[in-house]
Image (spheres, rainbow, N blue to C red):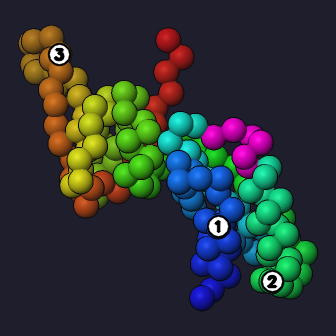
Amino acid sequence: MNVKESIEEIVLKHLPDETHFVVDVQVLEKSSKTSVKILIDADQGLNIDTCAIVSRAVGEEIEAKEILSDAYILEVSSPGLDFPLNSKRQYVKNIGRSLKVTLDDGKEIQGELIGVETFGLQLKVKVKEKGKKSVEEEMTLPFEQIKKSIVLVSFK
């Protein structure tokens, strides 16, 4: 098991309950210090107290098990809005929000996420035909065709 997998296993052990989940674990070598960035989320939203509790517990176990021998920086947070969605669970949490989805072929589609199925997403997109006003259409995008999905922020 590598360092990243070891840390992810530790994080899973210290999440408060099954409504919390790991989004990503990154172990980066920066100049003389190692940086460990842990992104967690929760079905009903994540608060800073949970991040602090997980950070303390994970840090203590990393040191007790001597997983990292040198000094390191540990950061536990929720993924920012610019962090691509990477699990079905994150998609479900964002139903009703606008997404920008980049497909494997490079095509970009923007629309409201209205559903998540086992095989893909359901989006409501505005389609404009020549000479007509735009209409809303539902489309399904299979997960295997999706390269990246980002939540779009609206300030309306």
Above or below, 15 against 138 in this view is below
Is tag 1's residue or tag 3's residue first in the polypeptide sequence?
A: 1
Q: Which residue is mark 2?
A: 65
Q: Nearer the viewer, mark 1 or mark 3?
A: 1
Q: Residues within 10 Å of mark 2 (few under 14, many from 20)?
A: few
Q: Do we see residue 34 in this rendering?
A: no
Q: Position of residue 113 (x, y in %)?
A: 32, 33
Q: Is residue 49 magenta?
A: yes
Residue visible at 41% across and 55% down? 87
Above or below, 128 against 102 in this view is above
Q: CA distance from mark 2 to mark 3?
A: 59 Å
**The residue tagged with tag 2: helix, strand or loop?**
loop
Q: Which residue is mark 1?
A: 13
Q: Main secondary structure of the magenta part?
A: helix
Q: CA distance from mark 2 to mark 1?
A: 14 Å
Q: Position of residue 130 (x, y in %)?
A: 9, 19
Q: Do we see residue 116 in this rendering?
A: yes
Residues at circles 2 and 1 in contact by the CB criterion of under 8 Å: no
Horizontal relation, residue 97 to residue 19: left or right: left
